[in-house]
Image (tube, rainbow, N blue to C red):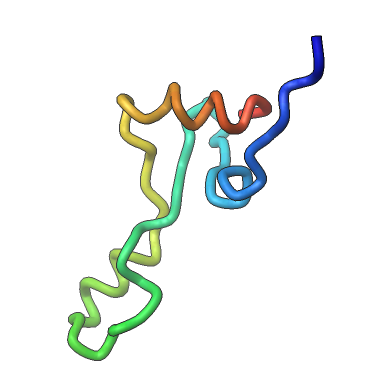
Amino acid sequence: MPKMKTHRGAAKRFKRTGTGKIVRASANKQHILTKKASKRKRRLRKSVLVHPSDVRRVRQMVPTL
């Protein structure tokens, strides 16, 4: 059986924490930032955990996570 291939796009977007959880960057931080409040933009800088219902799908795309 051939090796599993990693989805390279997903591999660049997700990281693993020390405890094994998967984190991702927040959405809505790329453009149209002038109308967004500074407080909101500051919150969007932080990474957030992937929702439990999506973890299985991410693990399939990136087997090393």
Most extreme residue toward the bottom, as rendered? Answer: 34
**Quadrant (top left/top right/bottom left/bottom right) for the N terminus:** top right
Most extreme residue toward the right, as rendered? Answer: 2
Q: Quadrant of residue 7?
A: top right
For image coordinates 72% across by 22% down, the residue present is 4
Side of 6 where 2 appears, left or right: right
Side of 40 where 11 appears, left or right: right
Q: In which quarter of the image is residue 56?
A: top left
46 or 31, nearer to the observer: 31
How many marks the image carries: the answer is 0
In the depicted structure, whether residue 7 falls above or below residue 64: below
In the depicted structure, whether residue 52 falls above or below residue 16: above
Rendering coords of residue 2 (x, y %): 81, 16
Rendering coords of residue 35 (x, y %): 18, 87
In the depicted structure, whether residue 9 falls above or below residue 63: below
For image coordinates 36% across by 81% down, the residue present is 31
Rendering coords of residue 37 (x, y %): 18, 81
Rendering coords of residue 3 (x, y %): 79, 20
For image coordinates 60% across by 49% down, the residue present is 9
Side of 39 where 11 appears, left or right: right
Most extreme residue toward the top, as rendered? Answer: 1
10 or 65, nearer to the observer: 10
For image coordinates 57% across by 42% down, the residue present is 15
**Quadrant (top left/top right/bottom left/bottom right) for the C terminus:** top right
